[in-house]
Image (cartoon, rainbow, N blue to C red):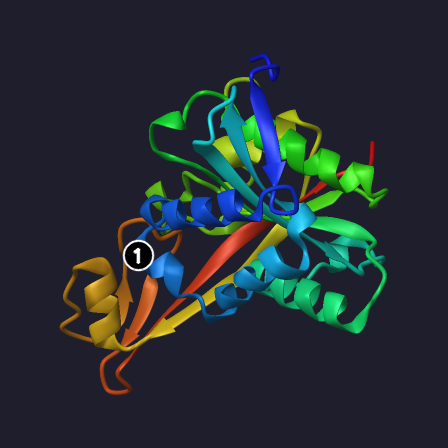
Amino acid sequence: MSERNYHIITATANPGLVNDATRLIDKEWPEFMLHDPVADLLADCYKKLPDYQFILIEGDSNEPLALGNSIPLDWQSDFDDLPDDGWDWALSKGIADFASGRQQRIQCALQIVVFGDNRGKGLSSLMVRAMKRIGAERNLNGLIAPVRPSKKCDYPLTPIDNYIKWTNEKGGPFDPWLRVHHNLGAKIIKPCHNAMRIPGTVAEWSDWTKMRFPESGRYVIPGALVPIEIDIEADTGLYIEPNVWMHHPKE
């Protein structure tokens, strides 16, 4: 797909347009995914690190087709040492690094969202390439990503350690999102088993999922990569999402 008709606009260049696009995100995620407490820090990225937040538009239109968020980190240890609490850690650390004035060493992807009917047109690859260019222009040491494997929700009982070993007929990753990164030069490092922690009351989980939870136990819910844990006596539900650390080397 040609990139000539597509344009990347950062929150630095047009903060209003990019911020308006964030209103479309809620429609693209399962409701429970909007309730990770750490995700509240994402709003700070648009204010403090606007160069790393961007949208994709086509031609002269101001209509956003996709949105991307990333964050620079002060990280220079081995990639095998990346934490198990991937996404939550990356967002928290990035904001803390900025506040402390620590050196920006590597870029970390936070999310890429392709809106509505624009999915299936190859825009995800354009967005990853755009994200990598943003880091390269700032001489960062490549891109790391706690990738949310998009088809894992179809296999919620399969351990993530097994799932990442599945391949397609060409020998690439079975999962479409892992495959997008793989095809653009990224390597799988390891799972991050506790990438996101989403707590809630039983009533909140019933509201988020439109399901009832009559007793304590593990439940498979639509859109989740693994089952959630419900404790009726404690009136709690907890979802701990696994993601997959991947690394795009500096080009």
Give the residue drawn at x 56%, y 16%.
5
Give the residue drawn at x 17%, y 75%.
215
Residue 40 spot, x, y in % from top left:
49, 67
Compared with 14, 118 (above or below) is above
Label 1 Cα neighbours within 10 Å, binned few <14 / some 14-19 / many ≥20: some
Give, as a three-letter code, the residue at label 1.
Answer: Glu
Give the residue drawn at x 82%, y 56%.
104
> Callout 1: helix, strand or loop?
helix
Assign the N terminus to one quadrant of the image: top right
Q: Which image quarter: residue 56?
A: top right
Q: Which image quarter: residue 41?
A: bottom right
Compared with 182, 6 (above or below) is above
Compared with 97, 12 (above or below) is above
Please tell me how many numbered marks the rendered image carries. Answer: 1
Residue 201 spot, x, y in % from top left:
28, 77
Give the residue drawn at x 82%, y 43%.
138
| Residue 175 in view in this figure | no
Kindly identify which residue carries mark 1: 31
Assign the C terminus to one quadrant of the image: top right
Indicate left or right for 153 with 49 as reference.
Answer: left
